[in-house]
Image (cartoon, grey):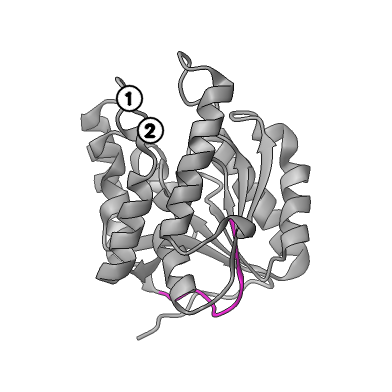
Amino acid sequence: MRTSSLLSNRANWEAHRRVAVDWRPPPVPTTVVVPHPDDEALLFGGLIQHQRQRRLDVHVIAVTDGEASYDNVDARQLAATRRREQDTALERLGVGASAITRLTLPDGGLAAHENTIVRAIEDVGHGFIAAPWVHDHHCDHEACGRAALDVARRSGATVAAGLFWAWHRTDPQQLEHRLASLHLDEIQRDAKLAAINAHSSQLVADTPMLTADALTPATWHHEYFVISTYPHAPVEATR
């Protein structure tokens, strides 16, 4: 998508951001479902840091190793690089290696493995789940989002669905509820940016996956989520 199109679509989201509901994550252990290395930082870096500052357990389900992000790089080598980058990013957010479950499912093929993702969420625990939005304009993001909602519908969990590609490529008319907004203080935002910077393979290639324009929403002082609670209850403002 051309830069002008990216900017135009982000402008379409501005009205939704302006009326977003102030929100704080529930003070409970948190399961974060991450389709690719870097999504933990891009979508949930502030939320993870927020929960760790509260001394809450955060467990990350790393669903793929991101081996398909570049066609001209050996997949096995790229997967190893991206796992190391993700370990570093999560360490900067306060999550150690013992709190990471790696599924090594195929990058780009998660729609065929949703049941495996569901079982992983159930095995880790699922009172509060963070996962990508089901309309985040990437097949793997959307598969992880569907898996999280499947678990939540049957268990009564709350899901905070994060957005990344949606800011650039998804029609905001697909949003059924008001966005929830998590304000990031400077410590949380700095930790998020440090975690993003750990993913150098996505930032400094000849044609990087994460361009400066694509990264703009990840640098905001708020993270935005679509909240789903089962049985359904509306998100309440904190003020």
Q: Is residue 208 above or below residue 157?
A: above
Q: CA distance from mark 2 to mark 1?
A: 6 Å
Relative to the observer, which residue lies in front, 93 or 134?
A: 93
Point out the stretch of residues depicted in magenta: 23-32
Question: Which residue in the protein does label 2 denote?
Answer: 202
Residue 220 appears left or right of 53: left
- Quadrant for the C terminus in the image: bottom left
Residue 26 against residue 101 in the figure, above or below: below
User: Which residue is more in the foreground, 141 or 134?
Assistant: 141
Q: Where is residue 115? Give x, y as percent.
A: 78, 44
Depicted 48 relative to depicted 11: above or below = below
The label on residue 123 is none
Q: Tag 1: residue type?
A: Ala
In x, y percent, where is residue 206? 29, 20
Mark 1 Cα-neighbour bin, 10 Å: few <14, some 14–19, many ≥20: few
Give the secondary structure at mark 1: loop
Q: Residue at x 66, y 45 (%)?
A: 102
Q: Position of residue 131 (x, y in %)?
A: 56, 54
Q: Going by the image, does 226 lie left or right of 65?
A: left
Residue 225 occupies which quadrant of the picture? bottom left
Image point 32% across, 53% down: which residue?
Answer: 194
Residue at 25 percent across and 69 percent down: it is 186
Q: Is residue 231 visible?
A: yes
Residue type beneath disc 2: Gln
> Label 2: how many residues lie within 10 Å, few (<14), some (14-19) or many (20+)?
many
Residue 107 part of the magenta segment: no
Q: Which residue is label 1 attached to?
A: 205
The reply to whether callout 2 and callout 1 are in contact (CB within 8 Å) is yes
Quick one: 188 or 167, which is closer to the camera?
A: 188
